[in-house]
Amino acid sequence: MPERLLAPEGTRVDIAEFSHGGATLVAEDFGEGERPFVLLHGIGMGRSVYIDLISNLTGRIIGIDLPGFGEAPEPTRTLTMERHADFVAAFLHDRGIADAVLIGHSMGSQIAAEVAARHPDGLSGLVLAGPTVNSASRSIGLQATYLLWDLLHERPLVWWRGAREYLRGGPHLIRKIRATVVHEPEKTYPRVRMPTLVLRGQHDPLAPSSWCIEIADAISGARFEEIPDHGHGTMISDSWAAAEMIRNFAAGL
């Protein structure tokens, strides 16, 4: 059975698997309030990397392990970003959620954007944090180089949580990275029609400011915020600034 990873001890929590179309995700659902925050992690990660972030958020929170990551079993085939999005939308529909604030970090931002474009009825707002993949750097080699450079300058907590989750990502990680890199999110952003917050750490090489500004310009009414002295892992450690921006964004919906 999946374990409690995010919910504080003493908090009522629902941890369940959801299966659809040959894939299974794990969701940890706790807290109360309107507009639940739904968290989508990056490549090789899982919901456990958001422990610091959820300590700075209030209300209902749903942390997800996408198929083949974290505690979720490996799917029968590697999911594209579009299939991930359809799968997440099916989960939200199954839970009766129609007003989520969907927060996607790194690869999760690509999936979140696809959910917003393809299945907007389940959402009230969208947060794209450290959005990948920069259209000017669409190759596994470049993305790996940027990730390594970022990790060299990140806090040890990011190394530890990232390394643990990458090991749990399994032997199909290269195929999963390839599915992320071949996706072209710039074709998706103009189809997003909802309040959107684009976040990046000031020193994030995977989500350069020019790319994030391009994303914000492509989504009508989107807002761009930059977090000083942070890198790509701004949602994983020392996340109070990102959480504050997300809370303010959600309060204005």
Image: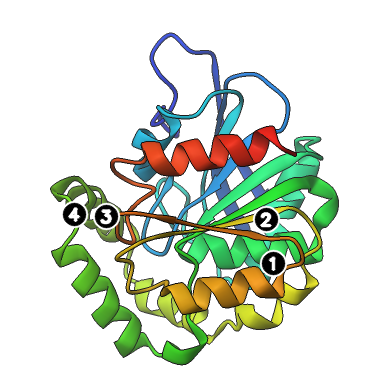
Residue name at image x 46 percent, y 91 percent: 136
Q: Which residue is mark 4?
A: 159
Q: Which residue sits furthest right?
A: 121
**CA–CA distance in space, label 1 to label 3:** 29 Å
For residue 103, above or below residue 95: below
Q: Specify which label sits upstream in the sequence, 2 or 4.
A: 4
Secondary structure of the residue carrying numbered label 3:
loop
Which residue matches tag 2? 196
Q: Which residue is mark 3?
A: 229
Mark 1 is on which residue type? Glu
Labels 1 and 3: the sequence-earlier one: 1
Against 81, residue 253 (above or below) is above
C-alpha span from label 2 to label 4 = 29 Å
Q: Is residue 65 left or right of residue 95?
A: left
Comparing marks 1 and 3, which lies closer to the viewer? Answer: 3
**Of marks 1 and 2, which one's residue comes earlier in the chain?**
1
Q: Mark 3, mark 4: which one is toward the viewer?
A: 3
Cα separation, mark 2 vs mark 3, equals 23 Å
Q: Disc number at residue 114? A: 1
**Kind of residue at disc 4:** Trp
- Name the kind of residue labelled 2 in the image: Thr
> Badges 1 and 4: C-beta atoms under 8 Å apart?
no
Q: State the SS at label 4.
A: helix
Q: Secondary structure at mark 1?
A: helix
Residue 16 in view here: no
Q: Quadrant of the N terminus?
A: top left
Between the residue at mark 1 and the residue at mark 4, the CA separation in whole angstroms equals 28 Å
